[in-house]
Image (cartoon, rainbow, N blue to C red):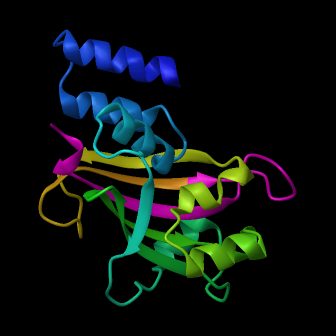
Amino acid sequence: MRSFAVLTALALLAGCTSPLTAFETTLASQDSATAALTQWCAARAIASPALIRAAPNGGEPLVATPAIRALLGVSAQEPLAFRHVRLSCGEATLSVARNWYVPARLTPEMNHQLATSDTPFGTIVAPLGFRRERLAAQSGPAADCPPGTVLSHTALLRLPDGPIEGAAISLVVECYTAANLP
């Protein structure tokens, strides 16, 4: 992926692509939005070191609708967890994310870290080797994104293999901020 970042930077310097297009390309190059934001933060020198942190965004947890449960492949009785965070690199908030996830499909240690740390979801669950399935993307804010959102994504994160191959572990709605653009 490092060569991808270099090509993106060269294309920007040559004026071949807009910053938003370069940002979208960086996001599309990774299954983990956290990994893409780390790469973007480093390439743009937003902060040094380029370390992404997840801070609680406040508010009451959003109850998963039947449509969310269907996307995650869980019954109405199966427990879901919810995390609403601001993903920041240094002082810059790069994304506001709402994440419904299936605790039973994660390890006990992952669930503990999600409940007690500022480590992003993508970093914590990276050992699972998940893959990202983008469901929606749009320039500007999706419903419930904060003002100043320049790009919105909705995605499922799925397990690649194992006893529940392809099972969704998370549904995430990401609202990317103008702090990502020069």
Residue most extreme to the top: 14
Residue 31 position by quadrant: top right
Residue visible at 53% across and 65% down in the picture: 119
In front: 122, or 132?
A: 122
- Judged left or right of residue 107, residue 180 is left
Residue visible at 20% across and 30% down in the picture: 19
In front: 87, or 96?
A: 87
- Judged left or right of residue 23, residue 51 is right
Residue visible at 24% across and 44% down in the picture: 180
In front: 41, or 155?
A: 41
Residue visible at 32% across and 55% down in the picture: 90
Residue most extreme to the front: 48
Position in image of residue 115 (x %, y %): 58, 81
In front: 89, or 57?
A: 89
Q: Is residue 118 above or below residue 32?
A: below
Marker count (numbered): 0
Image quarter in which the C terminus is found: top left
Q: Is residue 167 magenta?
A: yes
Which span of residues is magenta-colored?
157-182
Position in image of residue 124 (x %, y %): 62, 61
Residue most extreme to the right: 163
Q: Does the magenta stretch include residue 30?
A: no
Q: Is residue 85 above or below residue 12?
A: below
- Judged left or right of residue 156, residue 174 is left
Q: Is residue 53 above or below residue 100?
A: above
Position in image of residue 152 (x %, y %): 28, 52
- Judged left or right of residue 138, residue 161 is right
Position in image of residue 80 (x %, y %): 59, 81
